[in-house]
Structure formats: structure tokens, C-alpha cells
Image (spheres, rainbow, N blue to C red):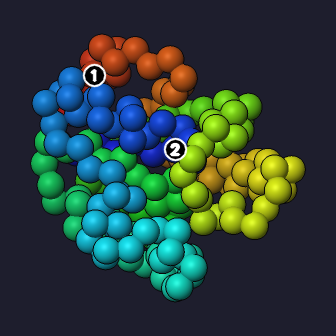
């Protein structure tokens, strides 16, 4: 079984993924980290050199590589489900879980984040908030195609594991 965690930037996909993998005794893969390890370049630098379109192509190739693995929790980059029919592939090959996060919480996490995000480069805080609101509005209908949606701020992991179990039958 493979479980895909999807959601917007700053929704905690990697943190939740590591904990869930530990609880379920599954392997954990973060597609962003997988990308950086495989291509020996940070996503930020890749965007700078090659652009978003090329990144999305490589990201799609990584997804196709990962959908054959079993007993794995895969944390996707925030945009991965939104390009190249990736959401259909995710739902076809595994159980998708949308980590839904209130916009105010996303902004609070963004303000406190040390990680550089290529899509937020050269924007002041007001521009960032406007951009994120617009991007979330565009992406949310795709995220909502997930088989499971959970509130990402206070996850009950035993309930989540039980819910996943119902989908795996």
C-alpha cells in the first residue's frame, strides 16, 4: 500500500508523513528531498536555473518512479498534484490524504519558516500573502479530489490510521 500526503505549502506534510510512517511501520519519502538527492541540486536553485515548467516535468517523472513502491508514505510537494494529471495517478496508485490547513495558519507558518520557497522569491509579505491566497484558491479543488481530507492542525493519528485501514480493503 502507498499513501500520498498532499496539501499546500506549510501544511506539515513532511512532519505528518514521518510520524505516520513510524506509526504504520512504513518507509517515508518526501518528494522534494528525493528530488534534491537524486539531482544533486536544491529545488530553489533548480527553479532559478531551469524554471518551474522543467521542475514539474522532473517531479512528474519522480512520481512515476515512486508509485511502484509498497508500504510507503509519500509526502508530495505542494504543487505536485496540480500538474500533469498527477492527482489522477496518485488516486489510481494509492490512498491520497489532503492535509487541509486554514489560510491564517499557513501564513503564520510561512512567516516563521526558514526554508526558501522558489515561488515566494522577491516578494514582500503583503505580496506573499496575496500570492498564496490566489495559489491556494487555484490548487484547492485539486487537493479536494483526495480520498481522505483531514484538518492538519490537530491530527488524531489513531483515527487517521483507522481511516486509512478502511480504504485499504
At x 27%, y 18%, the residue is 162
Disc number placed over residue 7 in the picture, else none: 2
Q: In this view, does 146 lie to the left or right of 22?
A: right
Which numbered circle lies on residue 141? none
Q: In this view, does 120 lie to the left or right of 76?
A: right
Q: Name the residue under label 1.
A: 161
Foreground of the two, 77 or 162: 77
Judge from the rendering whether residue 38 lies leftward or rightward of residue 8; answer left or right.
left
User: What secondary structure is marked by label 1?
Assistant: helix
Relative image position of residue 127 (x, y in whole percent): 84, 56
Q: Residue 73 location, x and y as percent?
A: 26, 42
Image quadrant assignment for residue 106: top right
SS under mark 2 = loop
Residue appearing at x 30%, y 28% in the figure: 19
Q: How crowded is mark 2: few (under 14 residues within 10 Å), some or many (20 or more)?
A: many
Q: How far apart are marks 2 and 1 (CA)?
A: 18 Å
In the picture, which quadrant includes the N terminus?
top left
Q: Quick check: marks 2 and 1 in contact, CB under 8 Å?
A: no
Q: Which residue is drawn at 43% across and 68% down?
A: 42
Query: Where, quadrant-wise, is the C terminus in this rendering?
Result: top left
Position of 121 relative to 72 (above/below) = below
Q: Quadrant of residue 153?
A: top right
Furthest-bottom residue in this view = 50
Badge 1: residue crowd in 10 Å (few <14, some 14–19, many ≥20) = few
Q: In this view, does 102 lie above or below 154?
A: below
* Residue lying farthest to the right in this orientation: 126
In this rendering, does residue 88 appear at all?
A: no
Amino acid at each position: 500500500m502507498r499513501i500520498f500526503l498532499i496539501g499546500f505549502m506549510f501544511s506539515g506534510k513532511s512532519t505528518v508523513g514521518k510520524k505516520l510512517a513510524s506509526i504504520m511501520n512504513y518507509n517515508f519519502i518526501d518528494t522534494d528531498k528525493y528530488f534534491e538527492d537524486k539531482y544533486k541540486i536544491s529545488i530553489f536553485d533548480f527553479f532559478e536555473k531551469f524554471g518551474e515548467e522543467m521542475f514539474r516535468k522532473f517531479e512528474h517523472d519522480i512520481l512515476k518512479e515512486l508509485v511502484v513502491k509498497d508500504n510507503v508514505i509519500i509526502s508530495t510537494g505542494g504543487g505536485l498534484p496540480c500538474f500533469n494529471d498527477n492527482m489522477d495517478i496518485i488516486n489510481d496508485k494509492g490512498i491520497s490524504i489532503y492535509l487541509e490547513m486554514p489560510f491564517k495558519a499557513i501564513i503564520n507558518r510561512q512567516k516563521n519558516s526558514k526554508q526558501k520557497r522558489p515561488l515566494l522569491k522577491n516578494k514582500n509579505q503583503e505580496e506573499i500573502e496575496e500570492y498564496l491566497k490566489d495559489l491556494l484558491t487555484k490548487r484547492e479543488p485539486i487537493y479536494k479530489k483526495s480520498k481522505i481530507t483531514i484538518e492538519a492542525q490537530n491530527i488524531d493519528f489513531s483515527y487517521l490510521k483507522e481511516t486509512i485501514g478502511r480504504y485499504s480493503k
